Every structure is written in C-alpha cells, then in structure tokens.
Amino acid sequence: MQQGVPRGAPPRPARPSRTPAAPLRISPRALLAGLAAGAALVVVLWLAQAVPSLRLGAFFATLAHLAGLLAAYGILVMLLLMARVPAVEHGVGADRLARWHALGGRYVLTLVLAHATLALCAYTAANGTDLLTTALNLLGYPALAAAAAGTAVLAAVGAASARAARRRLRHETWRALHLLTYLGAALAFAHQLAGPDLAGGAFAAWLWTMLHTTVGVLLLWYRLIVPVRQALRHDLRVSEVRSEGPGVVSLVIQGRGLDALRAEPGQFFRWRFLGRRLWRTALPFSLSAPPRNDALRITVKACGDHTRRIRRLRPGVRVLATGPFGALTAHRRTRRKVLLLAGGVGITPMRALFETLPAVPGDLTLLYRTGSADQLVLRGELETIARSRGAALHYLLGPSDGPFDPLAPRALRNLLPDLPDHDVYLCGPPGMTRSAISALKRAGVPSARIHTERFTF
Ligand SMILES: Cc1cc2nc3c(=O)[nH]c(=O)nc-3n(C[C@H](O)[C@H](O)[C@H](O)COP(=O)(O)OP(=O)(O)OC[C@H]3O[C@@H](n4cnc5c(N)ncnc54)[C@H](O)[C@@H]3O)c2cc1C
C-alpha cells in the first residue's frame, strides 16, 4: 500500500541546507590499499632476513617468522580499525569497519596459532625432542611465556566473538571480554621485540615500535581523551523525552557549542545516559534531526532492556556522547537525484538527510517502509519537509511476508521510472536491507550508488 503526502497544508519555508566544511575522509579503497602496502612491507622485512635452508627445523622457523610478523601486523591493523579515528570513521563507516575487524580478526587469530605451531615444530625438529617437552622448555623463557599467555588471551577473545558464542553473551559481557585484546596485544608486542626478526635489526625494531606507539596514541586519544574532553566541553543533558508512537521516543539532548563536533545529518553518536541501570553502556543512535549548536535529537525504538529504559529517562539526566561516527552522509552523493529508502527505525538518519540534502523540487524522494501505518514515526515532520522542499514521500505499508512486495524491482521502477539515475541512501533492518539492495541492483542502480548503514555491528 502506498500513500502520498496530503496536500493543502500551508508550505513551510525551506530551511537553508547546511553543508559543513568537508572533514578529512579516508575512502575504503584508500584504507585497504594502505593496509595491503603495509602487509607487503612486512613480507619484504621477512624476505630480507630469511635464510634459505634445507633443514626441517630451519624451514619451520622461517615460516613461523613470516606467520608471526604478519600476525603482529594484523593485530596492529585490528586495533587501528577500532581506534575511532574520525577520518577513517567518516570515510569508511563504523559498520563496515566492524565487519572488516570481525573478518580480519579470524585471519589474525589463524596466523597467531600458525606461528605458535610452526615455532614449536621448529624447536622440536632442531632439538630432536618431542612437542610436549619442547613446549614445557620454551615456557621457561619469559618472552615466550608472555607470547603463550598473549596467544591464549587472543584465542579466548576470538572464541567469545564466534557467532554462536556472541549470540549467547550479553553485549556488555562480550565487550568486557574484548577489552582483553589490549592485554593480548601488549604481551605479543613484548615477545616480538625479543624475537629474532626485530632484535637483529635496529631499524626494524625502531619502525615496529613507532608503529605500535602511533596506534597506541591514536587509541588513547580517540577512545579516551577526546570523549572526556567532549563531555567536559559540551555538558550534555536530556532536555525533552517525547513519545513518537508505540515504543518509540525522541530525546532532545541539549549542550554547549555543539557545532564544534562537526556532526552531519546521517551520522550517529554512542550515547551513555548517566541514569539508573543505563550508565554502564554506550548505545549507538543516529541523529534524527539536523544537529544544532545547542541541541541534538535522537529517536529510539524500544527493542531490548536498555532501549526500554531510555523511554523512562527524565529531563535533566546527564549524557556522555562520543562521535560523530558514520559515513552515511551527503559526501557520498554522486548524482543530482536522490532516493532515501528507510525501513522501520532506519528512518532516523533518513529524516535528517531528507531535510538537509541539497536538492531542488523533484530531486528528492523518500520511501518509508513499515508493517502498518501506526508504526510510522516522525510522520508530521516528514510531510512538512516534503511539502516545503517539493520532495516526494511515499509510505510503503504492509507485512514483509505479504503478497505484494513494494520493494520489488518493478514496484520501485513504477514509483521512480528514472531510478537508475539516482543515488540511493538505505537504512533499515538487516533482512529488508539485503532484499532492498538486491532489488535496487536488479532495477538498474549500480552498487557503487547504493549507500547503506547497518544498525548492527
Ligand atoms: C550505527 C547505528 C545506529 C543506530 N541508530 C539507531 C536509531 O537511530 N534508533 C534506534 O532505535 N536504534 C538505532 N540503532 C540500534 C540500537 O543501537 C540498538 O537497538 C540498541 O543498541 C539495542 O539495545 P538494547 O540493549 O535495548 O537491546 P538488546 O536486546 O540488548 O540488544 C539488541 C542488539 O543491539 C546490539 N547492541 C546492544 N547494545 C549495544 C551497544 N552498546 N553497542 C552496539 N550494539 C549494541 C546487540 O548486537 C544486540 O544484538 C542503531 C545501531 C547502530 C549500530
């Protein structure tokens, strides 16, 4: 079922669109190229020191060195991806970074285990003893004991992050376990400095230390110092809690000098509400209205313990927010015409973009998919924006398993005959996002013009 914007109400004058000065952004391709170049350099470092030999022990040792160097580099990359460096967050997007981190983590863990196994085989072959005796002997050396402890910690974090385990763990428990990665990385670093690859070369040891120091400083700066500075500077507090429909509330959060955050429509913050049973966790929510110098707004759907508690927050509660994060912003646009496609509470970033993306009448369309009309939120605002900007707004209502699929390629082309000429911004539940991407591609939109953000990490 589709429903157009009711006509007749007096148009509200269009607000001038805010186009903030572009912050530095590192594109996904540039980041991947940089990381691949780093891996290639690691291989060169290994080749420069590898001594060809036909002895079995030496063969295992050479491979162990390669696996160890790549594993160490991989650990560094994993930490860098999660350092929340703004140029990376805004260029690549937090959801994509989280996916790369999860995928990369598996490879890194495999390399760590391969390194440990190959090194054990190398020592065993060289000494002519059995694996158990070698392992017990090696644990007598402090650097190797540290390495074994680091490997055990990383393996435990990896096991806790496996899909089956993560589904059973509370988010907070999983996060607390994940913090152990820092311990694992520190133990591994101590081992690397004592290892033959770096101990033998002053330049390599200096470079390795500089790389680790840089990533350490970035982590400290963006995950600790910047959030504390933001908290002191902006003094955020909940100023209004407004019901938007069944289980959905909007929160207006007031603060000082918020322009300095340089938040953009389409982005999100991690919010920590210093209220009862909420202060322990920082939850990601998108801005549901363009940011102002004195206020930010989010719209939250109750779907679990924390989001249910948010509904009961009262004005005055202090808020710690870190961000902005996310790459679903105007900078991704490549075409004059834009389709915003929202599913459920995925309307929040779309609502902010609907008001602010520069467009002349006829260029902008918002499709908003929900199960039924009573699940539509921010409806009055969307209709006012549509009228004032000459933008099209369609509600696509009906159950996702109903006989008519309003997101099928043909249905989309009926609504927008020139769909392939559009950039598409998409945000919704995972199932809807997957099928919408597939339908958009089949309707002729190239994947490079489908910009999406997932509401899960
Ligand atoms: C980038 C992004 C933007 C989002 N924007 C909005 C929005 O504008 N409005 C809205 O209603 N929802 C939004 N969400 C979803 C919202 O963050 C989750 O619904 C909320 O965190 C669930 O918390 P809960 O404890 O109530 O639910 P739970 O049932 O405990 O958790 C549900 C799921 O949310 C995830 N989750 C829980 N806690 C966290 C956390 N601290 N950090 C990250 N993920 C967590 C877990 O993967 C879990 O499977 C967004 C999510 C992301 C990733």
Image (cartoon, helix red, strand yellow):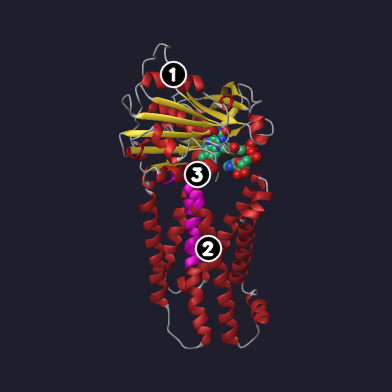
**Which residue is drawn at the image coordinates 49% and 76% (left, top)?**
63
Foreground mark, 2 or 1, reads 1
| The label number, if any, that marks residue 435 in the structure image | 3
Residue 76, magenta (yes or no): yes
| The label number, if any, that marks residue 384 in the structure image | 1
Measure how far apart labels 1 and 3 are at the Cα level. Answer: 29 Å
**Which three-letter amino acid code belongs to the residue tagged 3?**
Ser
SS state under label 2:
helix
Q: Is residue 386 left or right of residue 130?
A: left
Answer yes or no: is residue 284 visible: no
**Which three-letter amino acid code belongs to the residue tagged 1?**
Thr
Measure how far apart labels 3 and 2 are at the Cα level. Answer: 32 Å
Neighbours of disc 1 within 10 Å: few (<14), some (14-19), many (20+): many
Residue 295, image x, y percentages: 49, 24
Which of the two labelled residues, at mark 1 and mark 3, occupies the earlier sequence position?
1
Q: Which residues are magenta?
A: 70-99
Q: Are marks 1 and 3 in contact (CB under 8 Å)?
A: no
SS state under label 1:
helix
**Which three-letter amino acid code belongs to the residue tagged 2?**
Val
Q: Is mark 2 within 8 Å of ligand 1?
A: no
Answer yes or no: is residue 236 visible: yes
SS state under label 3:
helix
**Which residue is drawn at the image coordinates 62% and 54% (left, top)?**
163
Picture layout, residue 59 above or below residue 365: below
Residue 42, image x, y percentages: 41, 67
Which of the two labelled residues, at mark 2 and mark 1, occupies the earlier sequence position?
2
Q: What secondary structure characterizes most of the magenta part?
A: helix
Identify the residue position indicated by label 2 in the image. Answer: 108
**Which residue is drawn at the image coordinates 47% and 26% (left, top)?**
289
Which of the two labelled residues, at mark 3 and mark 2, occupies the earlier sequence position?
2
Residue 201, image x, y percentages: 42, 72
